[in-house]
Image: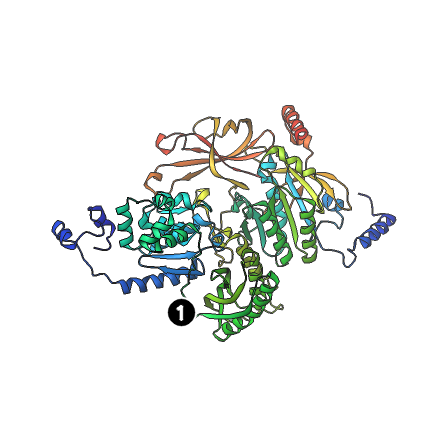
Amino acid sequence: MLSLDLAARRLGLRPGTPVAKAQALYPDLVLMDADPQGDRQGLEKLALWFQQRISPIVAVDAPDGLVLDTTGADHLHGGEMAMLKDMLHRLAGVGIRARAVVADTWGAAHGLARYGRAPIAVVPAGQTVRALAELPVEALRLSASIVEGLATLGVSRIGALAAMPRAPLVLRFGPDVAQRLDQALGRVGEAIIPVRPLEPVEVARSFAEPIAAAQTIARYIGKLVPPLCQALDTRAEGVRRLDLLLHRVDSRIQAIRVVTAMPVRDIKRLTRLLCEKIETIDPGFGIERMVLIAALTEPMERRQRVSSLIAEEEADVSDLIDTLANRVGTQALYRFTPVESDLPERSFCRVPALAPEGTKDWPEHWPRPTRLLARPEAVQAMAELPDQPPLFFIWRGVRRKVKCADGPERVFGEWWKNDAELTIARDYFRVEDTHGERFWLYRAGDGEHGETGSQGWFIHGIFG
Amino acid sequence: MSAPRPALEALREQISRLEGHNRLRRPTLPFGVPEIDSRLPGGGLVLGALHEVAGGGSDALHSAAAGQFCAGIAARTRGKVLWIVTRQDVFAPALKQVGLSARRVIYVEAGTDTDVLACFEEGLRHGGLGTVVAEVARLSMTASRRLQLAAETSGVLGIAIRRWRRQSNAADFGQPTASLTRWRVSVLPSVSLPVAGVGRARWRLELIRARAGECADFEVEACDAQGRLAPCRLALSAALADGSDQEEAGQRRARA
């Protein structure tokens, strides 16, 4: 057996068990023929999907994985860890259980993803040797015969293998062991040859002499963008994700990815977005080929501008949104939109900055604080039961006497979301202390019934 | 304030010519409170300039009153508002209560102060926004000059909410910057109502610095549903019912 699902693993079966034995143990086992060709095609499809969404350089890591070069793309997803979580979440959404690791090299990430402990991990730069030391030698992408041979020698961990002298190893097993080891530890480079999107809109330019200066790269970006926009124009499409691949003379590929909030095919705007990223690439000994690919395109209609006679037009800020999103990441740029919920922390959600405007709105007549604390903080307070505001409260070591208060505004738990919220209630008060500072306090509970909450006091916001 | 004196006006004109702002009289955004507007050169907050706002007392940490004050100003400008923060704790329903609809506000959550300043400048330079508000702790002379120049070229109102993690860092507000005006907003006890409840919030606005203007203190009632301030109808002494409060208010002022 080659591969097993979770249920089969729980029964104690492992890859490598003979089929006859497994069937003898569990007669109702569902068996399917291995289809390496189909698997490969499936992975390629998945690779294209990742290429559109995560990072420009994606390749199939046969037989069961994908390898992505996420350099310069992780910040668009809110950091490396957030990116991995997002990837696994998306995969889980389509029913694929996966493990993901970010490491300095392809080899290290390959090994850690398959043999590492955590299903999701980020190895900090420069810690590869330590992270790999405890892994079995199978993690090095060696052939089965070599692994067997190493086992005969008593070498089972990568740490032990790395400490051995090279010459006898090469004599006995050939150059493979040393090469894989060096690739995993980052001593020799390994190029990732990315999958190519179907029917891509791309323009390329090769140079007789390698280029390296930022100004030169900027000039050639300026020459590549217009033909790309022209090609997009004929297809009536605009670009949402644009990749610039820079092939270096040492056969590594550096990539720049820019994302846009709306389909764009404006030459000036795309050139500017790309040029802002030049500083992030490392030209090494020079760049011999530049390829500009529209990784994700969307139909774009020509719009008629509203005449200024009818209404004063609101300025278009989508280009600013794109510039900022490429600097701080798409997740860091948002608007708030109302959600129908009485609990303050659930009464809003983040939507993309250019999302269509909703019609819902918050009620206007309830006092709402300017600043909402990330989580309510417990305060010591004294209040008359059942529904009087506190007489004083102590927050962060400062005792404040309450001069006047508004309330209570009673909020009930959302029982349709969570059974535990069936009985809980909160009483919100706006209080003003003797200095004029205003706070939003609540009591967890209605002050009468124990099941409605702990009856403790919390501060949830600060009024202006 | 007395009627403008011709000699002083001529001198001001001469200075502004020297400074190179003589192309056009820059548009301003009046507060609608005559006491404040008459103290500001141009009769209001100059659009296309950088202004600084900080909270007084413990509000230097939370910037609740300062945030509301800025939201009220932003609500009265046209176009989208960019609100740049390092840690997000703005409660959008409160901004709506001073007339700043959530549909107009785009938030940027930048990781560091440097990113905040970079996004701030980018926003000011663009020119399509109504107001750019940024919550920053440190603002150097160089950075503020860049922001001021960016705002001048595009005509967008830029407001820097100075907000610190620690109370002790708030002394940083004394450092010189290139902003046109500098405000400190602190809360005042509200007027006692004849019934139980909390009255309309009141603020002490301190105009600490105004280029080509004088410092001044104002007591105002907080922004209403359209983001407008109102002058206090009662003097502070009359508003406070008992002496103990007055004493404490005095102490608070001394601290701020």
The residue under label 1 is A198
Residue A189 visible: yes
Q: Left or right: where does residue A409 sit relative to residue A176?
A: right
The way the protein has been coloured in the rendering is rainbow
Give how far across and how far down residue A343 sits, in percent. 43, 42
Furthest residue in direction top, as rendered: B244
Q: Is residue A27 above or below residue A297?
A: above
Chain where mark 1 sits: A
Q: Quadrant of residue B2?
A: top right
Q: Quadrant of the N terminus of chain B?
A: top right
Residue B31 visible: no
Amino acid of disc 1: Leu
Residue pictured at 52% horizontal, 66% vertical: A288
Towards the viewer: A25 or A303: A25
Q: Quadrant of the C terminus of chain B?
A: top right
Q: Left or right: where does residue A107 sit relative to residue B21?
A: left
